[in-house]
Image: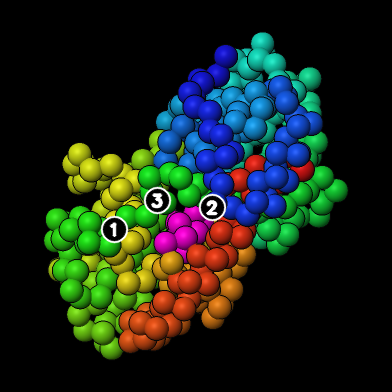
Amino acid sequence: MLPHVETPIQKLEKYQGIISDELLEGIKNLAKDFKGLKVIMVNSTPRGGGVAEVLKSLVPLMKGAGLKAEWYTIPPREDFFKITKEIHNALQGKEYTFPFWHRVRYLEHMERSAFLMRDMKADIWIIHDPQPAGVILYLPHFHPSICRLHIDLTSPNPEAWNFFVGIFRMYNKVILTSKEFIQKEIKERALTFPPAIDPLMEKNKPLELKKARLILESFGIDVKKPLISQVSRFDPWKDPLGVIEAYKLAKKKIPDLQLALVGLFLARDDPEAMKIFKEVEKTVEGDPNIFLFSNPDQIGSLKVDIFVNAFQTASDIILQKSIREGFNLSVTEAMWKRKAVIGGKVGGIKLQIQDGKNGFLVSNPKEMAKRIAQLIKNPQLVEELGKAARETVQEKFLIPRLLRDYLK
């Protein structure tokens, strides 16, 4: 059997008053047909990263709706995760030759994982992202099965795509976040709906501004000066160097501006983060107004969720300057907290932010700097965008809606 992730049961009624009565009743009616259905979710890691975060809330909610939902992960293996990080980047468009030994190592680990799954039974399998997707090659009776891809497949690297497309086509359905990500080879089995956040998670619960500011002050941030933050992994697709460039440009108009880059190393399947962090560290050397958070030890006994909540709550503006993005949970979390968010005009962020209505979309550091200065100088606009952002999330991006989409 694969490593199992323990999850509680979460009742749908807990979301009463947060989501509409119409959505609540709609889910209850849909769930009646699936009482006792055994659903197994499989991904690469039990913590860190967006997929684990979604499953941490979705699986308990499925249980609360009457399904027999369980969550498993493939066995951890460092060399495998280094290869799958390359694969992940390649499927998002990075140059990659996909050497023969990478293919062999990937398939070996898939065969090993499939061997552990041989006696597992489910009414429906949902496999998340390319890391575990290849198990289907070694499980002939692995149906009905769904491959849920959370990545930006706008323009995948041909080497990686040609290897994986046959795997994806073995699944009954492939779920993507945006219609833009549908490649012609999987069109006939593709469905689209975005991920969501859980408003009942500690990270997304209301945090008093005064408390949030005290937390930031304990890390050396001057809460009387404007603060912009990006809460994201240190990853080339999140473009932290572009954020620093935008900050430096904006600082010419807002001299006391501060920047925080919050990207704690929590995911075991992301070996690239340290390399990117070193580049960032070198770039910001000597600037006392840039704060970097990468090591979980930096925050001591403070819970990660409260730490992140504090930054999202007490920052003046939240940034997400991604250059590829399947969907960004941090953007949605900040929008839920009524924050003005400036995001990269790419992938899933375009589903989250409507430019000028509930945030801003930008294509380069210069555009981002312009929007930063505009918002810092216009608190009323910040408030208006934040209010619209909250409404967008309430309507489209909360976890019960994701459950409804899966049931459908």
Residue 53, given in percent of the width and then of the height, sits at 48, 42
Q: Residue furthest top?
A: 119
Left or right of residue 326: residue 278:
left
Can residue 279 be seen in this snapshot? no
Q: Which residues are magenta?
A: 328-337
Labelled disc at residue 205: 3
Q: Tell me the CA gap for discs 3 and 1.
A: 10 Å
Q: Residues within 10 Å of mark 3 (few under 14, many from 20)?
A: some
Q: Count up the numbered dots.
A: 3
Q: Which color scheme did the rendering employ for the protein?
A: rainbow
Residue 117 pos. (x, y %): 63, 17
Look at the picture and state if 202 lies above or below 244: above
Amino acid identity at mark 1: Glu
Residue at figure coordinates x 34%, y 46% from the top left: 305
Q: Main secondary structure of the magenta part?
A: helix
| Residue that appears at 48% across and 33% down | 45
Label 1, secondary structure: give it. Answer: loop
Q: Nearest to the eye among marks 3 and 2: give it.
A: 2
Q: Mark 3 belongs to which amino acid?
A: Lys
Rendered residue at 20%/46% (across/down): 298
Residue for badge 1: 208
**Is any atom of residue 367 visible in this view?**
yes
Sequence order check: which comes first, mark 3 or mark 2? 2
Which residue carries the number 2 mark? 18
Is 390 part of what is drawn in magenta?
no
Disc 3 secondary structure class: loop
Residue 330 part of the magenta segment: yes
Residue 86 placed where, x, y %? 52, 45
